[in-house]
Image (cartoon, helix red, strand yellow):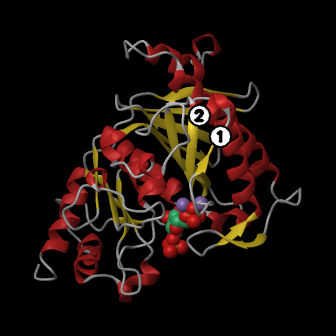
């Protein structure tokens, strides 16, 4: 990379601010604070194994999962950074039962709220496998100058102002959208800056990868079972059989599929009629990015993820995301109820 031509995340966001005639830099400050928190999380993730940050916290999160020390650390970092930005009046996090409102004079005037999965892929933390952070930013609907309300967080995904994720992988990257395409930035640890490395990301129109936890096979709906069989069949015209790839971190699985072309499915199962993934801070932000990159995200039953009206903070939803053609095909199998 020619170092004189490096565009940092902050420079890029400020440049893009000019696309919005009435922008006052609030979103810019918010994204920059998320960037700072993610650099701190990056630093700790890199030290994991050396310092006492691995392992269980001994507590459970609102959806009943064991909290890891890094889940709690990351949550504290993002809450601290968003509060300090003074642009955000509250957050909804995977790690907090209720919304967290920032009740000081500055934050009460914040126009935005954030939903966040501070650390995605918790089960991979202790074994040095990629993990991530997922976030979405909305304009509040409650009155400025007052505490944020739950209604601010229960907005349809179509109302997202920005969404992104950070992947702590072989390198750390931030990928985000404000509804005008998707751009990716790689952290250069030597200068401590996210640098534009993946401008204008578009997902391949057709992919060769399918990602699903096949250990749950017997509990899958018939449509999913049939679609998996389709993925595994030989057909030279459609490049099948496809390759199976599953990490168990939504961010890492989605990121690979976004760049290489592939479908990610977390369907409903017998015991979990709404699947596992959470609408507010996992599916909606990823769906926004997928659509902006030319892909599609649905619940597998004909409903666009971004159109769903949320009813509760930790609500789950079946999730099918990837190139449009692949999601369409999977939905065809879901529709046919096994007749295909
Ligand atoms: P989190 O670590 O934030 O709770 O999310 C875990 C999610 C997601 O990252 C991943 O795709 C999925 O759980 C994996 O679930 P399975 O282990 O059931 O495959
Ligand atoms: Mn998650
Ligand atoms: Mn998480």
Q: Residue at x 61, y 50 (%)?
A: 100
**Would you say the residues marked 2 and 1 are in contact, meaning their CB atoms lie under 8 Å apart?**
yes
| Frontmost residue, 101 versus 132 | 101
**Outermost residue toward the bottom in this view:** 218
197 up-or-down from 18: above or below: below
* Disc sitting over residue 252 in the figure: none
The answer to whether any part of residue 288 appears in the image is: yes
Find the distance from the CA under tag 2 to the CA under tag 1.
6 Å
The residue at 56%/54% (across/down) is: 99
Position of residue 307 in the picture relative to residue 93 (left or right):
left
Residue under circle 2? 108
- Residue 77 image position (x, y, % from top left): 72, 45
Instruction: Give the quadrant of the N terminus.
Output: top right
Which residue is disc 1 drawn over? 103
- Indicate the quadrant containing the C terminus: top left, top right, bottom left or bottom right: bottom left
Mark 1 near ligand 3 (CB under 8 Å)? Answer: no
Q: Percent position (x, y) of residue 257? A: 41, 52
Report which quarter residue 67 is drawn in.
Answer: bottom right
Report the image quarter containing ligand 3.
Answer: bottom right
Q: Is residue 39 left or right of residue 194?
A: right
| Quadrant of res 159 | top left
Near mark 2 (Cα within 10 A), the count class, few <14, some 14-19 or many ≥20, is many
Residue at x 66% of width, y 37% of height: 83
Residue 249 is left or right of residue 262, and the answer is right
- Among numbered discs 2 and 1, the one appearing first in the sequence: 1
């Amino acid at each position: 990379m020619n170092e004189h031509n490096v565009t940092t995340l902050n420079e890029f966001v400020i440049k893009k601010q000019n696309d919005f005639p009435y922008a006052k830099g609030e979103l810019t400050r918010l994204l920059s604070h998320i960037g700072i928190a993610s650099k701190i999380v990056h630093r700790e993730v890199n030290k994991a194994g050396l310092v006492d940050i691995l392992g269980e916290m001994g507590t459970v999160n609102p959806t009943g999962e064991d909290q890891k020390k890094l889940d709690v650390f990351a949550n504290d970092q993002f809450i601290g950074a968003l509060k300090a930005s003074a642009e955000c009046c509250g957050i909804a996090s995977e790690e907090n039962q209720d919304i967290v409102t920032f009740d000081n004079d500055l934050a009460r005037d914040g126009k935005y709220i954030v939903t966040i999965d501070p650390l995605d892929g918790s089960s991979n933390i202790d074994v040095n496998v990629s993990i991530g952070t997922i976030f979405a930013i909305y304009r509040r609907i409650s009155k400025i100058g007052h505490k944020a309300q739950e209604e601010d967080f229960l907005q349809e995904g179509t109302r997202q102002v920005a969404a992104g994720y950070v992947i702590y992988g072989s390198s750390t990257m931030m990928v985000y959208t404000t509804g005008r395409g998707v751009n990716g930035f790689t952290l250069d640890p030597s200068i401590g800056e996210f640098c534009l490395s993946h401008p204008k990301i578009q997902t391949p129109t057709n992919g060769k990868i399918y990602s699903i936890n096949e250990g749950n096979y017997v509990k899958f709906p018939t449509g999913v079972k049939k679609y998996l069989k389709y993925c595994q069949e030989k057909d030279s015209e459609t490049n099948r059989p496809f390759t199976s790839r599953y990490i168990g971190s939504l961010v890492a699985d989605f990121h690979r599929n976004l760049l290489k072309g592939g479908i990610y499915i977390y369907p409903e199962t017998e015991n979990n009629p709404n699947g596992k993934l959470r609408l507010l801070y996992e599916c909606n932000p990823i769906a926004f990015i997928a659509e902006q990159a030319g892909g599609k995200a649905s619940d597998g039953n004909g409903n666009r993820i971004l159109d769903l009206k949320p009813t509760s903070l930790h609500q789950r939803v079946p999730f099918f995301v990837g190139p449009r053609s692949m999601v369409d095909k999977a939905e065809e199998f879901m529709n046919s109820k096994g007749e295909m």
